[in-house]
Image (spheres, rainbow, N blue to C red):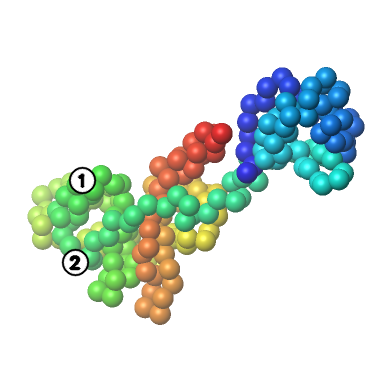
Amino acid sequence: MVRTIELNKRQEQILEIVKENGPITGEQIADRLNLTRATLRPDLAILTMAGFLDARPRVGYFYTGKTGTQLLTESLTKIHVRDYQSIPVVISENVSVYDAIVTMFLEDVGTLFVSDHQGCLAGVLSRKDLLRASIGKQELSAIPVNIIMTRMPNITVCKKEDLLIEAAKKLIEKQIDALPIVKETDLGFEIVGRLTKTNITKAFVALADED
């Protein structure tokens, strides 16, 4: 497990000892601090799991030389889209704009994904799309969403196995709120999930809250 943590005074002392004297055994570290090996064991376990130290059998502890920022970066590169994805809200391309607005309100989402008659991704609807369509005197129940949606291939997608940090970059670059998570089939892109800014935020909070 790799993450940034706030070290206590004894853990900082251990790091300094290992930096200056590594490789060094747990017993030797304990002697320098006038503590027992058993007392020191939890601190050594935390520093090793957090990535600050590396332990090798019959050799001892090494300082990895990594900063908290580097450890956080390593942690982010181990998280995939599938770890934080949400269930997609999908509507048919023949659904009216009015019904799409109702669906977005009832499902409490900011983005709807639109499927074609084969069940594959055909378009994306955002709040802005529906707001623009609502301005004016048009009969919303008579306008199908395929008139106003963003269509393929102008849709940014991601896959379950993609790194979460790469998907986050797509959200920022395209200035959008959500990405459809897709699986390639012979018919097109099957919609298997969604990734939103909220999912990204949950990932960062989870990293910060790990014990």
Q: Is residue 96 above or below residue 8?
A: below
Q: How many neighbours does mark 2 have within 10 angstroms: few (below 14), some (14-19), or many (20 or more)?
A: some
Q: Residue 154: x, y in percent?
A: 40, 63
Residue 51 appears at what percent x and percent y?
70, 40
Earlier sequence position, callout 2 versus callout 1: 2
Query: Which image quadrant: the N terminus?
Result: top right
Q: Secondary structure at mark 1?
A: helix
Q: Amino acid at mark 2?
A: Asn
> Could you say which is closer to the camera, residue 9 or residue 38?
38
Please tell me the numbered disc located at residue 105. 1
> On residue 60, which mark appears?
none
Residue at screen point 43% across, 68% down? 183
Q: CA distance from mark 2 to mark 1?
A: 19 Å
152 is higher (above) or lower (below) than 70: below
Q: Please say if 208 is above or below 119.
A: above
Is residue 22 visible in the rendered structure shown here? yes
Residue 33, picture quadrant: top right
Q: Pick out the residue farthest to the bottom.
A: 186
In-image side of 159 versus 10 (left or right): left
Residue occupied by mark 2: 94
**Could you tell me which secondary element the residue under label 2 belongs to?**
loop
Give percent across and percent down for residue 170.
49, 52
Q: Amino acid at mark 1?
A: Phe
Residue nearer the viewer, 18 or 71: 18
Q: Quadrant of the C terminus?
A: top right
Q: Quadrant of residue 186?
A: bottom left
